[in-house]
Amino acid sequence: MLGMTKESGSASDEELGFEPGSVRHVAIIMDGNGRWARARGLPRNEGHRNGVRNVQEIVKAARQADLRHLTLFAFSVENWHRPKAEVSALMHLLDSYLTAQADELKRQEIRLRVIGRLEELPRRVSRRIQRLMEETAHFDRWNLNLALNYGSRTEVVDAMRAYAQAVQAGLEDPEALDWATAVRFLYTRDLPDPDLIIRTSGEHRVSNFLLLQGAYAEYHFTDKFWPEFEPADFFAALAEFARRERRFGQTSEQLKSPRSPSSLRA
């Protein structure tokens, strides 16, 4: 499933258009399964099945790109409002994917993580996820992060609740609260912020996905539906990202000669 690393004969840097390992974290909003199926006269669930198959191909591409973190938006908190039969099918596909790919993830030494309210997923699915996370927890080079039952606003609410409880327990001082402290209460507390966020299907929304973590991320939008988003498209997005100049709120000259906030006000 996960394909070649550079050592085993993968494409050269020139062919890829970027240097493998130069990007730490890419997140993807996998959108368009239903429309992909409808355009082909297929049932909606067939689009989801092909979307799951494509996850395997993009994880393979991420491994070839030596990408340390790949985060996939697989199921949002809003998705519970979809028809019950569709939600049930999605949970079944998730369970089947984890069952089929468990040995391969371990063989390729890829750590599985989940961000979101895991405890609200069906018990069978949550137990399987928890077991696979435990079995891969010792891997530290490649990480597949699944955003399941995730929403950025829900994440903020959960973080605020956890922080308030810590304050009540005397473990945190509100007067000392800063961003570094707040990060410790997010689902992504031990993950780097995404460098690049990709959305498929021609939509240009961020859809409540990594709103805080993506504050300085670059975005890449493509018209392709998720089931047809190929490794070549993934590599092209990384190559385009490599050509961008990231400023993080500063001008090019400020980045070359960083100064303190006080000196900027002088």
Image (spheres, helix red, strand yellow):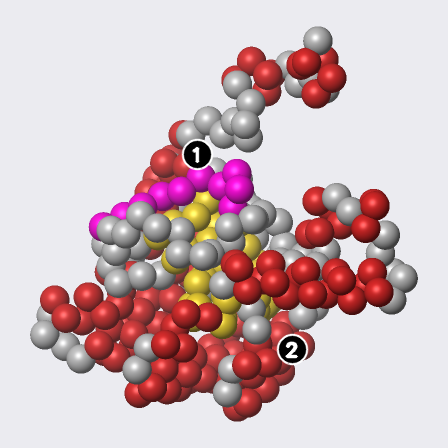
Residue beneath disc 2? 135
What residue type is disc 2 on?
A: Glu
Residue 215 drawn in magenta: yes
Q: Is residue 227 left or right of residue 241?
A: left
| Residue 140 can be seen in this image | no
Residue 81 percent coordinates (x, y): 36, 76
Residue at the far left: name it: 41
**Pointer 2: residues within 10 angstroms few (<14), some, or many (20+)?**
some
Q: Which residues are magenta?
A: 214-223
Specify the principal SS of the magenta part.
loop
Q: CA distance from mark 1 to mark 2?
A: 34 Å
Residue 191 percent coordinates (x, y): 63, 54
In the image, what residue occupies the spot 68% across and 13% down? Answer: 265
Residue 237 percent coordinates (x, y): 36, 43
Out of 182 and 20, give the one closest to the viewer: 182
Residue beneath disc 1? 242
Q: Is residue 162 left or right of residue 26?
A: right
In the image, what residue occupies the spot 34% across and 86% down? Answer: 84
